[in-house]
Amino acid sequence: MNKETLDFSERDFEALLVKSNEMVLNQFKDLEHLKGYHDHPQAIVESWFDETLPSKGMNVFELLEEVESKVLKTATGNLGPHMYAYVMSGGNQISIIAEKLATTINQNQTKWHLGPAMNEIEKRVIAWTAEMLDFPKESGGVLVSGGSAANLTGLTVGRNIFFEELGIRKKGLFGQKPFVVYGSEEVHSCIDKSVELLGIGSNHLRKISTNSFFQIDLNKLTQQIKTDIEAGLKPFCIIGNAGTVNTGAIDDLDALAKLAQKYGLWYHIDGAYGALAGILDSLKTEYKGMEKADSIALDFHKWLYQPFEGGCTLVRSWANLKRTYYKKAAYLDTELANDGNRLEFNEHYFQLSRNAKAFKVWMSIKAYGMDHIKAMIQKDIDLTDYLNKLINNSADFELVASSKLAVSCFRYVGNMTTKKEITKFNKRLIPALEKDGRVFIMGTQLKGEYAIRACLINHRKTKDSLDFLLEVIRDVAQKLE
Ligand SMILES: Cc1ncc(COP(=O)(O)O)c(C=O)c1O
């Protein structure tokens, strides 16, 4: 290694790149048999990394070997077809290349001249996203870390624009009537966190009950808005779900748009899980009204098969972002810029330094094309239908809930007869499945009842993976019985 800098000689660096490429390629060998989870006890995993701060560097080939054995070989099987927990996509190969190249040039998405091409690429990805969702051409947006940040960002823009006349950016929320936010009882927990962070307080997040399809009950919502107005509170925002995390339920987004308009409220949509499925022709009617949102949260690390991290907030104009975030600072001044047409992301978002998250999205869309990506989303949905049919045709499983998207909630029933027995057994099954590790799957509560939940969001799954999923659950259950 060169002692004057941190760089290696070109030959050594090349050898390291070749070795690391081999390691990448190894990850794609025999993916079909990749375990969903490797059940190493926490204390053991901690012990692998328990060492004092190194003052001298080590041989990097040995370091790569350590990485291979402790990190790569033990990684949770997101890449393979046996991951069903949470909302985990398997990433894609183009993004691996994109991330490496983006890290190499280390551009900063904060001021245009710090990365002209990368800044324009982020703008292009925002424009493409607006086109996909039928948002106006002048829509503004920003790439953020994920769905949680995207929801917080959308709601922040909503709050700052909606209450702009009260001067809340300067005065804060002191002395204001409580604002009220409305969403269904199925909203993601990041909505609760966002409402708390925004100083609105989760006591002012009204969680409206849902119908049997887990969609917000519109009558109850209307009634609650009226009750709050009568009580002297200030209704502020309706949040629609474009695919809930629990079951993939899509609220009646058009009806919510109309209600928001009737009561003059901000309309935000959490589309972190499902908004991108709205580009499928087969689902167009389900998503009617999504294009009317004032702000929408999306997650490219879900149904655009991107590796973590990559979320996106889209709003109807760049001006709304600027009115929310712009802060003058001498060191960021653009007065002397050569060109007045540069869009400065630091003026349109909270973060200053930011990596080029849009690059992998841009490269993926160009390399695969939207038709291919759409086909993969459709495949996830079709495979979920296949899983639901398998469950319905199996006497030892029962389907609890599903939706038009790719989530299936079900229970193992075996020969059990009472609900209490079934619930207790399924709760024991989840940790037993984690220990087994062949598949990685989790559970959830639906209207107070426990269910196993499978989320399919991986272009590498096949019908065989789903046959295998039920086989493994049955096998682990029978051993537990
Ligand atoms: C509907 C919904 N909203 C928000 C989130 C949070 O997204 P992230 O995990 O990217 O922060 C999720 C994650 O699964 C989600 O499904």
Image (cartoon, helix red, strand yellow):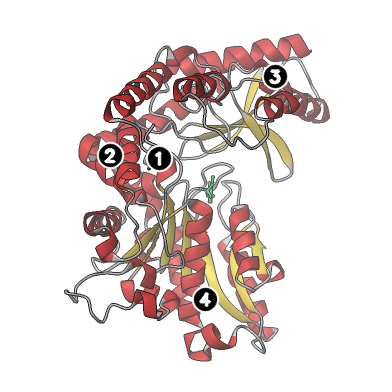
Q: Residues within 10 Å of mark 3 (few under 14, many from 20)?
A: some
- Residue 138: quadrant of the picture: bottom left
The answer to whether residue 173 shows anywhere in this view is: yes
- Measured Cα–Cα span from mark 4 to mark 2: 33 Å
Q: Residues within 10 Å of mark 2 (few under 14, many from 20)?
A: many
Q: Secondary structure at mark 2?
A: helix
Q: Which residue is mark 1?
A: 6
Disc 3 to disc 4: CB gap under 8 Å: no
Please name which of the two marks, 1 or 4, marks the residue nearer to the observer.
1
Q: Quadrant of the C terminus?
A: top right
Give the side of residue 145 with respect to residue 278, left or right. right
Q: Which residue is mark 2?
A: 364
**Residue 90 sits above or below residue 319 on the image:** above
- Measured Cα–Cα span from mark 3 to mark 4: 45 Å
Q: Residues within 10 Å of mark 4 (few under 14, many from 20)?
A: many
The yes-or-no answer for disc 4 within 8 Å of ligand 1 is no
Q: Residue furthest front?
A: 3
The yes-or-no answer for disc 2 within 8 Å of ligand 1 is no
- Measured Cα–Cα span from mark 3 to mark 1: 42 Å
Q: Which residue is mark 4?
A: 159
The amino acid beneath tag 4 is: Arg
Q: Which residue is mark 3?
A: 435
Which numbered disc flags the more N-terminal residue, 4 or 2? 4
Q: Secondary structure at mark 3?
A: helix
Give the side of residue 321 with respect to residue 34, left or right. left
